[in-house]
Amino acid sequence: MKIQGTSYQALQSWIEEMTELCSPESVRWCDGSQTEWDELTQLLCEQGTFTPLNPEKRPNSFLARSEASDVARVEEKTFICTKRPDEAGPTNKWADPTEMRELLLTKFSGSMAGRTMYVIPFCMGPLESPLAKIGIQVTDSPYVVVNTRIMAHMGSHILKRLEDETSGVLPKKRDGHAQFIKCLHSVGAPLSPGENDVPWPCNDEKYITHFVDTREIMSYGSGYGGNALLGKKCLALRIASNIAREHRWMAEHMLILGLHAPDGSTTYVTAAFPSACGKTNLAMLVPPKTYADKGWKTSIVGDDIAWLWPHNDGKLHAINPETGFFGVAPGTCWETNSIAMESMRENTIFTNVALTDDGDVWWEGLTAEPPAHLIDWTGKDWTPDCGRPAAHANSRFTAPAAQCPTIDPNWQSPEGVPIDGVIFGGRRATTMPLVYQAFNWGHGVYVGATMGSEMTAAAAGTIGKVRRDPMAMLPFCGYNMGAYFGHWLEMQRYLTHLPRFFHVNWFRKTEDGKFMWPGFSENIRVLEWIVKRCQGGAAGHETQIGWIPDYENFNIEGLENFTREDFEKVMRFDRREWRTELVSQGELFIDLYDHLPKELVFQRELLAARLV
Ligand code: GTP
Ligand code: SPV
Ligand code: MN
């Protein structure tokens, strides 16, 4: 069954080639329509991948339960394929492109037998934006199709655009060599004739591969999030970081947030925090009453990925290449993130959360008291005393950004929004103060490059161990990390108005293991200082590590049980701890030595000199 083809010959040929390779039972060109969504969600329900949620509680929404082994990104199986290993660099897993392609051809051969091959035309970024990128994802997963419909511009209008650009009806304008980025995906579970399907087909062997020179993505064996929705981490970060480097822009793992002050000014900032370290929460911050009463508001442009470029106005501008949120469910609740809760009221896909007896969803932290009975994320009966979590720690919701009550009016502006502040941060129980400001761009790049964070459930690994995660891009930078730092340093040359750089840490703990800072909506207090610093307003004092607010420059009005002493503790910069930090920062530099820009070595020397 072929529902549609394309007049764009290069694409038509590629699809024919992929059909031959993967031997699907049928091919379906996705149009992105509501009818298609209805058909596919129904199909997913029939196959047992989806459980429809109670339409009175959660209209047009579904719960998906994955295979227990397919719940997060697989960094060990994620490859950057370049001619030479040093192009991928020591922080990535490298594979030879020819060898990897040969291996994958054997894997993909016949991999879609008994299944439908979906062809998804999609666009990352507002179609009219100079940075927008068109991709075509070929997949045998209807779960991927419906998630992509939320996460990206998708369907016939994107295909039409590609046809018009390649036939000359519209000017060609996309940078990068490719008119469209080829994204091949299979769950790697062919069906023999008469074989029954399982609810979550996948393969124990997984390969998430990026062919940098030809701008191609091939992903095999997983149906989950960042492994399978190829527009997201594979295209918008790993491939895009390569295109960006060549064309003088930046693809970053950052939220984009608008801060509207009582004086009527709007300041946009971006923030890079590692996976599951608070981007979605900060991007959806609701000011507490004392701030709201004064007129503070926030708006969200994006919660995970930012594409930034030097605009003609001399400033760094940012767009969000996505149109949805693929957010962490556990811990999300009305008290800490009502905006996320509002955004997922309907038309939402939940993956690996628990099901309530009345057909709605639940996860740890949603309510203080858990329901008396649930079906857990593995499909088993669950009671509060059973000793197992009800939702997986990396369970997620896929919700349309357009449903977000605080979505920024300019979120689809092709020109993006101007960025005045860049914030870095990680999950650090010790050492890192609540906030400090870097001295300048070069120092800011050093602060981002040496970011560390305790590991979370978003990737397989030892949870809690501090690892260096430069700019929160460790799993996502598609080339040599040292060269990436060099690109960051170079970008300032193309700007006349430089943003300010900050480092924050919401996760500092007391000796008895409690968070020192209330976090969430109260983070607006830190943002207020940041906004004022960006505008050349608030005071602070210079320390060896950067500028830090004094108690007098920081608003803790209305913050109950938070004393001056608590403030001093959460802001404290301890020389001894920092000397240890400096040594640990050096480890990453040793790995990168031959590609590390001299300027970062100097920054480290300067910091060392200040710390003695
Ligand atoms: P990815 O989607 O994986 O890139 O993650 P993210 O950076 O968007 O993380 P998210 O906002 O979903 O936060 C994940 C976890 O951090 C949740 O468990 C939150 O409860 C917790 N968190 C977020 N903000 C704060 C904060 O200000 N303080 C504390 N203590 N925890 C926070
Ligand atoms: C992350 O891990 O940073 C995510 C989720 O945003 S995923 O799309 O699975 O990478
Ligand atoms: Mn992320």
Image: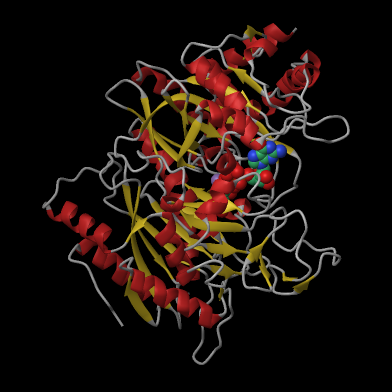
- Left or right for 159, reference 140: left
Looking at the rendering, in which quadrant would you find the C terminus? top right
462 left or right, relative to 51: right
Left or right of residue 273: residue 210: left
Image height of 340 relative to 188, above or below: above
Residue 21, quarter of picture: bottom left
Percent from the top left, x then y, of residue 227?
53, 57
Residue at 54% over, 70% down: 56
Which residue occupies 38% across, 16% down?
497
Residue at 47 percent across and 24 percent down: it is 261
Report which quarter residue 414 is drawn in.
top left
Q: Is residue 2 visible?
A: yes
Asked whether residue 141 is in view, the answer is no
Against 184, residue 534 (above or below) is above
Quarter residue 446 falls in: top right
Q: Is residue 58 above or below residue 460?
A: below
Give the percent coordinates (x, y) of residue 305: 47, 42
Ligand 1 quadrant in view: top right
Residue 599 vs residue 365, the one in the foreground: 365
**Front one among 73 and 341:** 341
Residue occupying the far bottom of the picture:
194
60 vs 270: above or below: below
